[in-house]
Structure formats: structure tokens, C-alpha cells
Image (cartoon, rainbow, N blue to C red):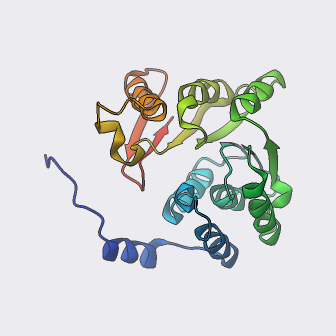
Amino acid sequence: MPDHMPPISEHLLAYLRKTSLRETEVQMQLRKATDALPESGWEVAPEQAQFLALLVQAIGAKLILELGTFTGHSALAMASALPPNGKLVTCDMEISYTNIAEAHWRKANVWDKIELRLGPALGTVANLIDEGMENGFDLAFIDANKKDYDAYYESALKLVRPGGLIAIDNVFWDGRVLNKADTEKSTTAIRALNSKIHKDERVSLSMLPMNDGLTVAW
């Protein structure tokens, strides 16, 4: 089998987006607003947001958990794919980002499907467990503080129903997972979780080379 994958060039990525991407006007507006921020690199790629929305549709999700809101791009995509009675619970700590998210959720008329919880993600998942939400979610998307990824994953295993999906972003961590000399907390945490999930018999998985790496566990 091939020992490498061809790189996605700028031109091939443009082709991918031209022939695959379906964005609403509000999604494009949100991307432009996020691109103006110094932290714009934190945003999910548009094709990744579309893939998450496809997962929502494919499994008929009605209740979604998102850890890490930022400016709300992935939440907007997933909430738009929910049925009218669906709900997405998302959390973040920085109101300057979530204010951007809320404004665009309202423009897209998905505000009533989204519950934003301000505060640390670890506190959010602990509260949801205390509220009796174990096995209640159809899908969880993890994209918050990287050093706490293992705790998010374990919490998601409790909160997502059997047969549901857990999607984990940034599993390549810009290639730093390959550098054994990199012992920064976030790098170490992601590298350890990748190895853990590979051996975890509680789930089936696929690690996808999408943007900065996306693992989907069933």
C-alpha cells in the first residue's frame, strides 16, 4: 500500500471547496468575521463543518454536545442540520467570541436550537452528568482546551448514547504529535489520547486527514 498521501495543494483545496462545499450566506459572513480575528486559525475549516453537519444528518441526531464554541462556525453548521425539535449544547469561556457566534446564530434562525453555557468545558460536562444526561446525546464534538482532551473524551463516553458518535478535532496538532521532543502539555495530551483511542475496545474509530486531523469514534 502507499506509504504516503498526496498533499492537498492550494489549488486542489480550492477545487474541493468549489465542487463540494455548500455554505449559506450567514456561514460565509461568519467565516469572514472570524478571519478578521488574530485567533482565526482556531476555526474549523468549512469542509469540516459541512462534514459534521453530514454526521448529524446521517445518524438522525437530535441532541448534540459541543465542547469549545469559539465563534460558532461548527455549532451553526450542526444546528442547521438538526430537526426542528433538535438541540445543541455548546460551551466556551470567552464572551467576546461567543457574542460573534450568537449574532450569526440569530441571523441563521438557529438560535432557538442552541444552548450556550459559559464556563470551563470540564465544568459543563460535570454539570450535564449531574443533571442526568448520561447516554442522552447522539453526537459530541470535542474542540476545547487540548490538555484536557482525555477528560473530555471520558465524559463524552458517558454522555453519548450507545451507537452515537464522538468527533475529536486537532488530533494532528499541526504535526507536533510526531515530534517526541515536544513535551508541551497540549501536545502530550493529544498524543496520549490518540494512542489510547487506538487501543480502546469501547469504540470503533477512524482518524481522518481533514484539516488538522479529525477522529470519529462510534
Q: Position of residue 213 (x, y in %)?
A: 41, 48
Q: Position of residue 14 (x, y in %)?
A: 39, 76
Residue 125 in which image quadrant: top right
Q: Position of residue 8 (x, y in %)?
A: 30, 65
Viewer-side residue, 108 vs 183: 183
User: Is residue 83 at all visible to an observer of this figure?
Assistant: no
User: Which residue is depicted at the point 43% across and 77% down?
Assistant: 19
Viewer-side residue, 174 vs 24: 174
Above or below residue 177? Residue 33 is below
Viewer-side residue, 25 vs 91: 91
User: Which residue is depicted at the point 65% across and 75% down?
Assistant: 24
The number of callouts visible is 0
User: Is residue 139 at all visible to an observer of this figure?
Assistant: yes
User: Which residue is depicted at the point 29% across and 36% down?
Assistant: 179
Above or below residue 54? Residue 68 is above
Above or below residue 10? Residue 132 is above
Residue 162 in which image quadrant: top right
122 to the left or right of 198: right
7 to the left or right of 37: left
Residue 190 in which image quadrant: top left
User: Which residue is depicted at the point 35% across and 41% down?
Assistant: 176
Q: Where is residue 171 in the image (x, y as percent from the top left)?
A: 43, 41
Viewer-side residue, 80 vs 151: 151
150 to the left or right of 89: left
